């Protein structure tokens, strides 16, 4: 007899098929839930390694440009283009948001 009740899925796990015929057990695979900070540190570590001893310049501007543009684009998509709501989510003034959207050619 099969129960019609479904067990609620854990947001941090995914069930993976084993490929066996019949009743196959589905092991739970933990999703990588890493903080943005550690991902940034890892990316910067690779960046410095790839420089092969050369000294970078304007790194602050480079990193902000690489992070800020997709951040703004993602928030604007999330808010369906509503700049007022986007500015509240970002914690910045709407005029500042508009300036940054223009800077990155997002409007």
Image (cartoon, rainbow, N blue to C red):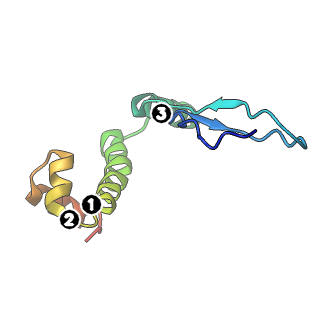
Q: Nearer the viewer, residue 5 or 96?
A: 5
Q: Earlier in the sequence, mark 2 or mark 3?
A: 3
Q: Secondary structure at mark 2?
A: loop
Residue 32: image quadrant is top right
Q: Position of residue 20 (x, y in %)?
A: 89, 40
Q: Secondary structure at mark 1?
A: loop
Q: Position of residue 42 (x, y in %)?
A: 51, 30
Q: Which residue corresponds to mark 2?
A: 82
Q: Earlier in the sequence, mark 1 or mark 3?
A: 3
Location of residue 89 with respect to 97 vertically, above or below: above
The CA distance from mark 2 to mark 1 is 5 Å
Q: Mark 1 near mark 3, Cβ–Cβ under 8 Å?
A: no
Q: Nearer the viewer, residue 51 or 76?
A: 76
Q: Which residue corresponds to mark 3?
A: 39
Residue visible at 17% across and 57% down in the picture: 85
Location of residue 84 with respect to 45 vertically, above or below: below
Q: Mark 2 near mark 1, Cβ–Cβ under 8 Å?
A: yes
Q: Position of residue 17 (x, y in %)?
A: 77, 41
Nearer the observer, disc 1 or disc 3?
1
Nearer the observer, disc 2 or disc 3?
2
Q: Secondary structure at mark 3?
A: helix
The CA distance from mark 2 to mark 3 is 29 Å
Residue visible at 53% across and 33% down in the picture: 10
Residue farthest toward the right in the current orientation of the protein: 21
Q: Residues within 10 Å of mark 3 (few under 14, many from 20)?
A: few
Q: Which residue corresponds to mark 1?
A: 79
- Which quarter shows the N terminus? top right
Q: 39 left or right of 77?
A: right
Residue farthest toward the front in the current orientation of the protein: 1
């Amino acid at each position: 007899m099969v129960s019609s009740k479904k067990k609620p899925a854990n947001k941090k796990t995914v069930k993976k098929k084993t490929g066996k015929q019949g009743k196959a057990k589905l092991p739970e695979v933990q999703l990588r839930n890493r903080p943005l900070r550690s991902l940034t540190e890892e990316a910067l570590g690779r960046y410095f390694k790839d420089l092969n001893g050369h000294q970078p310049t304007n790194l602050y501007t480079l990193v902000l440009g690489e992070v800020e543009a997709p951040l703004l684009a993602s928030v604007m998509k999330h808010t369906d283009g509503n700049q007022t709501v986007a500015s509240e989510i970002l914690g910045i003034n709407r005029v500042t948001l508009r300036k940054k959207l223009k800077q990155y050619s997002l409007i």
